[in-house]
Amino acid sequence: MKRISIIGSGNVGTNTAFFIAERRATDVLLVDIKDGVAAGKSLDLMEAGPVRDYVTAIRGSVRIDDIAGSDIVIIAAGRVRKPGERREDLYRDNAPNVRAISRDIRRLAPGAVVINIVEPIDLLTLLIQETLGVDRFKVMGVGGLLSSTRIRYLVSKALGVSPREVTGLIIGPHHPSMVFLRDTIRVSGIPAAALLSEPQLLQLIEDARNAGDTILHLAQRSTSYYAPSAAAAMLVDAIVCNTKALLPVSVRCEGEYGVQGLAIGVPAFVGEHGVARILQLKLSAADRDAFDRAAAALKAAHDSLAVGAA
Amino acid sequence: MTKNKVSIIGAGNVGATATYYIAEKVIADLVMVDIEGGMTQAKALDFLHAGPLRSYDVSIVGSSDFARIADSNVVVITAGLPRKPGMDRMDLLKVNAGIVKQAARAIAEHAPNALVIVVSNPLDIMCHVALRSTGFDLRRVVGMAGILDSTRFRYFVAEQLECALSSVHAMVLGGHGDQMVPLPRLTTVGGVPITELLDAATIARLVDRTRKGGAEIVALLKAGSAYYAPAASVAEMVEAVVTDRKHLAPCAAYLRGEYGIDDLFIGVPVILGKNGVERIIELTLTDDERKQLLASADAVRKGVEELNTFFKPT
């Protein structure tokens, strides 16, 4: 049975445990430095188990050492945005913590596949990979997958069809500059562009791009967490069952899409060891241009924040 | 919420396995009707005995009495003789038309508000039999073919690319026969058309294997034909109707001029919901695709003309 550790038992961490429990037989450990929080939430989840038929065992702990030997580690410990904040504003607050956690993972679970859900996703995913010093394909950030599920939902709603058959890939940073690959937005293979008007489709893409802000604006006191948790749980599924699902994730590129030494959102087949391979697509001139600009901005943020320097 | 009821006519391998898949979804009570009453009762009991372990809390009845389908939301017709090795679907026409007609008349009598899903082969022609013999609105009779052909195509693509089945979507149009029309440009991995991922020769091989998907299983089994994938396709359609899922998928639907085809059941993309075929999606086809679809339609039309030589709906 796979052992999964989730570091941080806030809304994202706990709901990731919840989505995993609803679907899989695994062993989940929730770790939080706040005394009792992880234990309390784990107990609450397990007490739902008899009614929900869980075959997953969820435990809580305050001790990071309990992650020893995990197959998958999910990092969900960090401050989230307040209304008006940009994702990159979180780097200075979250990086020291994430770096410390990465060192713990290196010490306790050096073989684990690591999933990052802490913002800013791309910069911290790179920081984690560099701190761990592991194969770049073993560290993935939840970015494009989250925007992908959002565009899939919005398109299905606009068309009055079920979302299960809707696809949509996103590349680029987890940032408003992300690039929606319009030709991949399809229903049962039929391009959404053949079923919706051009302005409708463009509006849906804008709505998906701003979905995180929309939820933050509506909820005020919390950022979105169901969809991010679902995205993390989906990666867990792909790893545990070695499905090789094609999913947009943030992963360190070494030449793919012309990016060198940065983690950024790209379509990848995900399996038991993390990214099995990155799918290199031919981009339209417009997408290429938008991606290059977004990647350059990410590089500038990376350099100005001196990511990686301890 | 009133409880849904789904009836399956024909409790052979396809009918019984479809019953099992639907039971596992826990969306409806189930009735299997078959002329072999004892065998049908036995299968129903066996499923019920498995219920405590599989956690499906639905009623499952097996019977030889058509009256048991009363008040069903959905009735699936799987009854018919299966294809034997070397046997053409058309060989089955006469004998299966009689069986489907009997089932359809029973549906009209006992479950006049039901939606009918036809599975018996030759599929597209049996849809005509069911439509005429029920006298139902043409959106309430739909054939299971495209979802099966697509799931086979999806599997072959996933196997070829070594990727997850769930990442692959496929579109297969036309009649449920050797002249079906798989559309590689609308067959995707995560939305990326396989035409960008595989070379033309590989795609041609997968298309050919899809066309012969049923025959490949028949040849392997020697006695019998495929039933897991067909039953799974039935369950997918039943779920779309019972849960009003608005599932966009290829199904055999009655065309009235769409795609330049009139008065014929053939596989096209539809939106499947509680009212049956709620919308037919008319794709812009390439000249070649259109030619293939029309050729497939011609083959189905020939079968319907053969049917007309002997068939009386009532």
Image: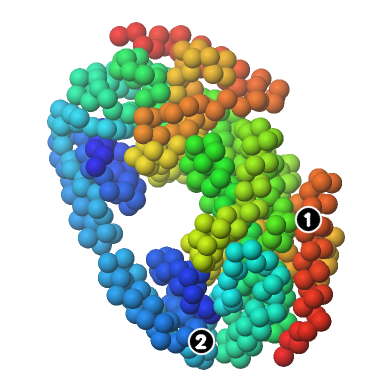
Residue name at image x 68 percent, y 50 percent: B182
Q: Which residue lies under the disc numbered 1? A: B293
In the displayed structure, does residue B202 sit left or right of residue A26?
right
Q: Residues within 10 Å of mark 2 (few under 14, many from 20)?
A: some
- Label 2, secondary structure: give it: loop
Residue B238, relative to residue B294: is it above or below?
below
Residue A41 vertical position relative to residue B148 in the rendered view, above or below? above
- Side of A14 relative to A66 (left or right): right
Q: Quadrant of residue A304?
A: top left
Q: Which chain carries label 2?
A: B
Q: Residue at x 53, y 14 (%)?
A: A255
Quarter the C terminus of chain B occupies: bottom right
Which quadrant would residue B233 be assigned to in this image? bottom right
B111 w.r.t. A15: above or below: below
Q: Which residue is drawn at 70% across and 75% down?
A: B93
Task: Look at label 1 and name its amino acid.
Answer: Leu
Q: Name the residue under label 2.
A: B35
Residue B17 seen in render: yes
Residues at circles 1 and 2 in contact by the CB criterion of under 8 Å? no
Q: Which residue occupies the foreground of this view, B22 or A228?
A: B22
Q: Report whether mark 1 lies on the same chain as mark 2.
A: yes
| Residue B221, numbered label | none
Q: In this view, does A166 lie above or below A102?
A: below
Viewer-nearest residue: B215 or A65? B215
